Image (cartoon, helix red, strand yellow):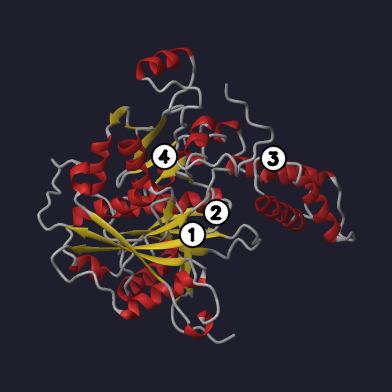
Amino acid sequence: MLTEFIEQQVAEATADCSPQLCLAVKQAFIDLKLAKSWNNVAVHALPGTNRAMITASRPDNEDEGDVKYILPVTTSEKITMDMLKKVFEATTKLQPEGTHQPKSIYLGIVENDSSVVYYRCEAGLPQPR
Amino acid sequence: MSSKPKQPRDRKTQLRYLPIVPPPSGTPQNPVLRLIHGLFTSNRLVPVKACGNLLWQPNIVWIEKDPTVSDLLWHGGCFGKGILSRSEPTWWNRRSAERHLLEYAARLNHTEGDDNADFLREVERESSRLHGISRQERSQIAQNVVRQLRQHRDANNADITNRVDFDTDSWKVAEALQLTPFETIFLTWALGVLDVRENETRLSGKDLWHRFMQDGQAHGAAPAMIWEDSGVPRNAIFAVLYAVYHHYRSHKWIVKSGIKYGVDFLLYSKSPMFTHAEHAVLVIPRHCDSTTGILTFAQLLKIHRVAGSVKKRLTLCYVTVPTEIDFSSASDPKTILTQFEVTDVIWSRWLPQRSRNAVDVK
């Protein structure tokens, strides 16, 4: 039952992904949706890359417009600057027209025991607090 | 006659390292007598065989929720991890607890003027009566519930319980137990307590071995150069890592994934529920007649710093792989594994000024 639910939600967006990435997307998806209970969890294909991106909003956040971007990643992948640059650019296309590139995305690193570890990735140097 | 365990169950005394139960005292030693004895008693070495499903590609193994199976695998060596939990599968218990607390808190009719700390205490007191979840999870759920109610203070509180999704009974068994490839091979091939099926076809331990060898891990946690220079072929990396897993499991350690700390495995002497890991194991493969497998000081320092900051002893596990070894699909896992040599070395920082008068660290 859970497998059908996951496949239904994730199939379209992961059509172009490699099998390893597809699995990572599925595991990150159920972690966010069911385990962490984030709201409005959706999977989108990232145009121009063979990847998928998850959009979701925090459970304690009432502002439904504040959407976070989570990129499922496997442990055997090399995260290169080139790849991240392409991902950030492609994410702009996911957003409504006219909005700027998102300041940060989260890398959802999926392990083989189904744990997902999240790391925030900011484009550029943040201001000192 | 074995006595029944006391209620409520004391989990610490019940810890087993493997999902097998040794025969109780009184079982005859003579094999014929033992066979006859076995016919009249329910003492079996393996209480029940678990059944897992191989899914997707690359393959993962999920074991559907079943109380006897969870008990066998989780309390018999901490195998597996609930896909929706941090360790033991408690998702449904947490959800039910949250729903129950939401209803309870809504009934309390808390208004804005009242003391929030009192309200939280009241909810936490109610949460302490719930079973099946840990103390940490209880307080977290209580805080979540209070926060949710505070957000919906203006809305009608009766509607809040409808916000808890996936609470129909059909979702009760949704959370499966996921096994890592190493755990799967250990349970199917080494111990024989697990049956893995793929779309109703039963796969043997050897079939699974070849599957995981093919689409197994690309490399371990050690720097990629170490793995590439060692000359271990891509389809044999799984065998090298499995050898280490098997080695520590045979020595009564509970072995879990160590990727969070930049190592291959974490070793627990008791259950992960009660203690933190004592050792962080980094696997270093090397060919027996070469000088490969050497970490630079900079690499060692980085890895040790991470492990040391969380109070784990860094254990370097050298696996020597003979050059002439057949990793093809016709090979037998036992033949491959018996040719490996596993040596472990503990790397820890020594401060001369501190150790001068102190007893040697064990």
**How many neighbours does mark 3 have within 10 angstroms: few (below 14), some (14-19), or many (20 or more)?**
few
Query: Which numbered dot is residue B131?
Result: 3
Q: Quadrant of the N terminus of chain B?
A: top right
Q: For the residue marked with disc 1, what is the amino acid? A: Thr
Q: Tell me the residue that label 2 is attached to.
A: A40
The chain identifier of the residue carrying mark 3 reads: B
What SS does tag 1 mark?
strand
Q: Chain of mark 4?
A: B
Helix, strand, or loop for circle 3?
loop
Residue at image point 25% right, 54% down: B240
Which image quadrant for residue A21?
Answer: bottom left
Seen from this angle, which residue lies furthest left? B324
Q: Are marks 3 and 2 on the same chain?
A: no
Label 1 belongs to which residue? A55
In the image, B292 versus B229, the foreground residue is B292
* Label 2 residue SS: strand
Image depth: mark 4 or mark 2 in front: 4
Residue beneath disc 4: B62
Q: CA distance from mark 4 to mark 3?
A: 25 Å
Q: CA distance from mark 4 to mark 1?
A: 26 Å
Report if the CB atoms under discs 3 and 2 are less than 8 Å apart. no
Name the side, left or right, on which A11 lies relative to B219: right
Q: Looking at the picture, which amino acid does disc 3 mark?
A: His
Above or below: residue B358 compared with residue B313:
below
Task: Please say if the residues under marks 4 and 2 sit with CB atoms less than 8 Å apart.
Answer: no
**C-beta proximity under 8 Å, tags 2 and 1:** yes
One can see residue A13 in this view: no
